[in-house]
């Protein structure tokens, strides 16, 4: 069997090697001796015949003990390797025994009916998940108390006694008390009740009464009602996806309600059971529309998802179904996933999870095709109002339009020509039609035909490139291809990142989902959709290598999980481009873009982009305006596709400034430092002149500032600064940044040692998050500092709350005057953040800037960290020229441009560097949170992955 990590294997569900012997089959009689339990219950009743309260207490102790023993055995078996479906069935069987024994005790020793009348007939029926014979450790126990007709005092007493007993044992019991006729009537009115009864199962009591109810239910509510039930369940599924989120590949999935989760599997089961009947999961699905392989995939998916769910419930002690970051390392370890070279165990586990979710999507398509073939699924959307047209043939042999969707004429269309698997999607794009589920089902079953020999033909190359580049919106086509498994077969390098995750809080999606979103954003930028980064849209008119850009975007993360992602990505992208038949020059360009796709983002966000050496180094790396344009567009799309709220206008401004500074150097023909400095000074002088023309004059303080100030802000920013500084003296003022995304805080006053630390500490105590800081000092010793501020949600600080900004300005004014707020800043990492092991680091560079020492730090993010770092710098007599701070999920990566106040030339001696590093490491390592924990145990943690 092919390993799931093999680059040539399709991204589908396969068995994981078993490293230890799993528990054998169980018998409930070996876990709970029903006869012995009833003997003990009878003894408890007889020993306390005059004391009903004591008899009840004794009985509950016996029942709770039996239930506890059963749950303990189920948990031990799960930890020893039993699958979750087996565990859930054992838990349901234990519950059956306890409820049956409680019922016998109640009707024998508490509310005995020696000769029951018709009104006293009573049966207890399991419904819902419990009715299916599967229970997660913390699931509700859903019971139907079935009576013959009107309620009698006896049956009400029995039910009341049993319910209070079950509640006192700590069970969450959902209950209903109905007649068979009431059950059927409600099932006809409410699909939720109908679904619950579809899963109903006799536990104890009057079995004939239950049989009557089931027969009536099948006759009156099920027979002839397939189409309506299917429509209701699919509508229910769609509403659930809309509520939870319609993306299958969010990195903290809800394994019960999320797309591709347990509820989707159960929906398939309910539909097939309603159509065909059956009792057990295996019975129902074996008689469904699946091939033997697809049936095996379904059962494996059910076992895997149930295993994950049972582990989560046992670990948390509650009905938790979200696979959050704090649980992922623990569940991965419990299920036997270990670290391998290039991938942590938790990442391998989550990849398996998303492959299962993908398989569930494929099974759903197969069911949909079967339903349409049998005309049991109602048309969706506007198609349900349109008259049915006969099939329309298409120019391509083997394809037609049927019911408004692209279908194939016969099942051998894919097998006879595997390239039809790709044509299916390009035809759908051209015709602007959906794809018929029948065609997707056939395609899924023939995917192996899209092999190396087929991929390397000229026609295949042309079709694959057309799928990526054709039309003005490749996103939907590529997503359809990925969902069907075709994209990973057509481009195997992409196939290796399908369902891959990175264990950090920065990325919101799996690698393949992120990549497809990025490609779609490139198309949006090209066609001016969405209002993102107008400069990127303008640049499309100038680029010459559109195909290279799209291919680089599609392949940019194919090196993840293989070591250094940029170096590995260069190898994978070269292999892909050569297979696609690209010319060497174009291949080299794609490889260069993939190998440097992080450079512009890191330079813009972590370096002083007004420093001549920064611009010269970056311009030398890029080498040409064409590469610069392509890299800028790719960088914008890459950041925007990471997740909601990751892209903001401030990042866009930084990237645009770096682009313009670099483009000016490249156009001038000199990318050495002297040439860049000359160009920057020229731009600074032009800006000073333009501002003077615009305002008439400038405050003397601004005229004393260095070149970096004039190239670091645009004309509108400088005009705002000039207006605020015109009155002289200390200045503290704020405004919403014109580009949005943050509030700009301007601070000016007399410089002193530790002032930046005081300002940073004041800001954090006000709840402000500093996303960037630019620090300037005039020749006369006065500062002009500009901070970009957001709140904890990543939104502009104080947006919509003017009073909060007033309070902030007063606090900063006090700090400027030497009265900063006192006291520490409380910080407490959340459970999710505490799941990550973050290794702090400090790097000190003298070669990044000609005038300053650059201090790079990386650490766990927490309130007050910037303030504490600034204090260390102040204590060591280091003045801060600029600070570039950024949060990436659970971590921060900050850079400080500093000068020594005591050393000629501004650079640090080796001894001072060692002292600085030691002091900073002490700060960065402080307040490291404990591992997340439950009341019973600490949970495992995993290393946060450095991947952007």
Image: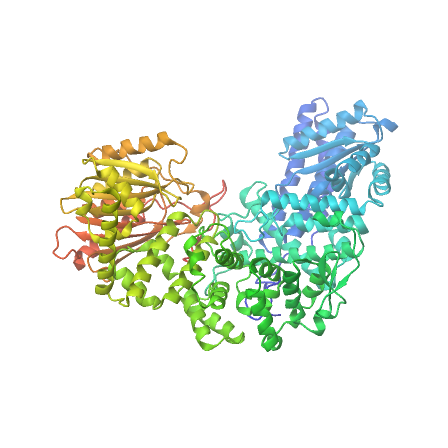
31 shown above or below 763: below
Q: Is residue 288 left or right of residue 351?
A: right
In the rendered image, the quadrant that contains the C terminus is: bottom left
Where is residue 487? Give x, y as percent: 59, 65
Q: Tag count in the figure?
A: 0
Q: Nearer the viewer, residue 144 or 526?
A: 526
Q: Is residue 578 left or right of residue 277?
A: left
Q: Residue at x 78, y 34 (%)?
A: 186
Residue 402 can be seen in this image: yes
Residue 759, quarter of the rendered image: top left
Q: How is the image coloured?
A: rainbow
Q: Nearer the viewer, residue 372 or 123?
A: 372
Where is residue 411? Give x, y as percent: 75, 67
913 shown above or below 133: below
In the rendered image, the quadrant that contains the N terminus is: bottom right
Residue 564 can be seen in this image: no
Q: Residue at x 80, y 24 (%)?
A: 154
Q: Nearer the viewer, residue 775 or 265?
A: 775
Where is residue 712? Give x, y as percent: 28, 51
621 shown above or below 268: below
Q: Residue at x 51, y 52 (%)?
A: 529
Q: Nearer the viewer, residue 142 or 528?
A: 528
83 shown above or below 145: below
Where is residue 540? Give x, y as percent: 45, 61
């Amino acid at each position: 069997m092919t390993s799931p990590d093999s680059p040539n294997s399709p991204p589908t569900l396969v068995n994981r090697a078993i490293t230890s012997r799993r528990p054998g089959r169980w018998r409930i009689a070996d876990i709970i001796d029903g006869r012995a339990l009833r003997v003990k219950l009878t003894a408890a009743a007889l020993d306390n015949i005059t004391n009903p309260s004591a008899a009840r207490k004794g009985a509950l102790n016996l029942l709770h003990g039996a239930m506890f023993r059963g749950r303990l055995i189920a948990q031990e078996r799960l930890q020893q390797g039993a699958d979750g479906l087996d565990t859930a069935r054992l838990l349901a069987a234990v519950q059956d025994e306890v409820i049956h024994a409680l019922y016998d005790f109640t009707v024998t020793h508490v509310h005995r009916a020696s000769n029951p009348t018709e009104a006293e007939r009573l049966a207890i029926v399991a419904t819902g998940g419990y009715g299916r014979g599967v229970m997660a450790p913390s699931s509700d126990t859903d019971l139907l108390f079935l009576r013959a007709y009107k309620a009698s005092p006896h049956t009400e007493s029995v039910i009341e006694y049993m319910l209070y007993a079950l509640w006192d044992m700590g069970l969450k019991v959902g209950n209903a008390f109905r007649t068979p006729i009431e059950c059927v009537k409600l099932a006809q009115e409410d699909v939720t009740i109908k679904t619950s009864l579809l899963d109903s199962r006799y536990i104890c009591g009057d079995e004939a009464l239950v049989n009557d109810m089931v027969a009536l239910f099948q006759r009156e509510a099920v027979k002839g009602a397939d189409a309506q039930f299917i429509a209701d369940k699919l509508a229910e599924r769609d509403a659930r996806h809309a509520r939870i989120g319609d993306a299958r590949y969010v990195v903290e999935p809800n394994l019960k309600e999320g797309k591709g989760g347990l509820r989707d599997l159960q929906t398939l089961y309910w539909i097939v059971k309603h159509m065909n009947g059956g009792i057990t999961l295996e019975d129902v699905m074996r008689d469904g529309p699946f091939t033997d392989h697809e049936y095996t995939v379904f059962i494996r998916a059910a076992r895997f998802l149930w295993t994950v769910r049972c582990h989560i419930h046992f670990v948390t002690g509650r009905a938790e179904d979200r696979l959050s970051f704090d649980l992922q390392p623990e569940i991965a370890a419990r299920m036997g996933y270990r670290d391998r070279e290039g991938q942590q165990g938790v990442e391998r586990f989550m990849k398996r999870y998303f492959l299962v979710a993908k398989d569930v999507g494929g099974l759903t398509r197969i069911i949909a095709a079967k339903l349409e073939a049998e005309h049991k699924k109602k048309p969706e959307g506007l198609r349900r109002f349109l008259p049915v047209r006969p099939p329309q043939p298409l120019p391509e042999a083997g394809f037609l339009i049927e019911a408004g969707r692209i279908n194939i004429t016969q099942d051998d269309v894919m097998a006879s020509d595997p390239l039809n698997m790709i044509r299916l999607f390009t035809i759908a794009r051209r015709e602007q039609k959906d794809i018929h589920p029948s065609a997707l089902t056939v395609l899924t079953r023939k995917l192996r035909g899209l092999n190396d020999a087929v991929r390397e033909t000229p026609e295949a190359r042309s079709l694959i490139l057309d799928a990526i580049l054709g039309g003005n919106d490749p996103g939907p086509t590529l997503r359809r291809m990925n969902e069907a498994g075709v994209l990973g077969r057509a481009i195997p390098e992409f196939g290796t990142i399908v369902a891959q995750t990175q264990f950090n809080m920065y990325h919101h999606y799996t690698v393949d989902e992120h990549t497809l979103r990025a490609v779609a954003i490139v198309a949006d930028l090209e066609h001016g959709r969405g209002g993102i980064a107008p400069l990127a849209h303008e640049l499309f008119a100038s680029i010459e290598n559109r195909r290279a850009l799209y291919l680089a975007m599609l392949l940019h993360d194919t090196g993840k999980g293989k070591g250094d992602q940029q170096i590995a990505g260069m190898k994978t992208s070269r292999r892909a481009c050569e297979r696609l038949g690209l010319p060497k020059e174009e291949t080299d360009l794609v490889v260069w873009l993939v190998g440097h796709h992080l450079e512009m983002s890191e330079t813009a966000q972590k370096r002083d982009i007004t420093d001549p050496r920064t611009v010269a180094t970056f311009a030398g790396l890029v080498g040409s305006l064409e590469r610069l344009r392509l890299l800028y567009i790719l960088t914008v799309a890459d950041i925007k596709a990471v997740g909601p709220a990751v892209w903001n206008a401030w990042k866009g401004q930084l990237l645009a400034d770096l682009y313009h500074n670099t483009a000016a150097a490249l156009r001038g023909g000199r990318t050495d430092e002297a040439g860049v400095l000359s160009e920057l000074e020229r731009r600074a002088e032009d800006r000073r002149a333009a501002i003077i023309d615009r305002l008439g004059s400038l405050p003397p303080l601004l005229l004393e500032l260095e070149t970096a100030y004039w190239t670091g802000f645009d004309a509108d920013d400088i005009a705002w600064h000039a207006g605020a500084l015109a009155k002289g003296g200390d200045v503290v003022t704020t405004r919403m940044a014109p580009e949005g995304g943050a509030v700009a805080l301007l601070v000016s006053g007399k410089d002193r040692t530790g002032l930046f630390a005081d300002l940073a500490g004041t800001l954090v105590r006000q709840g402000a998050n500093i996303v960037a800081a630019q620090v300037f000092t005039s020749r006369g010793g006065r500062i002009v500092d500009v901070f970009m501020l957001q709140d904890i949600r990543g939104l502009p600080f104080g947006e919509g709350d003017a009073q909060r900004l007033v309070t902030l300005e007063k606090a900063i004014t006090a700090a400027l005057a030497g009265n900063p707020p006192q006291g520490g800043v409380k910080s407490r990492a959340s459970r999710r953040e505490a799941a990550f092991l973050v290794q702090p680091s400090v790097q000190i560079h003298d070669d990044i800037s000609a005038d300053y020492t650059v201090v790079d730090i990386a650490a766990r993010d927490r309130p007050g960290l910037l303030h504490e770092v600034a204090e260390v710098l102040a204590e060591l007599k280091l003045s801060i020229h600029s600070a570039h701070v950024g949060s990436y999920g659970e971590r921060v990566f900050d850079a400080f441009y500093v000068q020594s106040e005591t050393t000629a030339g501004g650079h640090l001696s080796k001894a001072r560097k060692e002292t600085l590093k030691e002091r900073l490491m002490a700060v960065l390592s402080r307040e490291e949170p404990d591992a997340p924990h439950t009341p019973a145990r600490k949970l495992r943690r995993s290393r946060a992955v450095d991947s952007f």
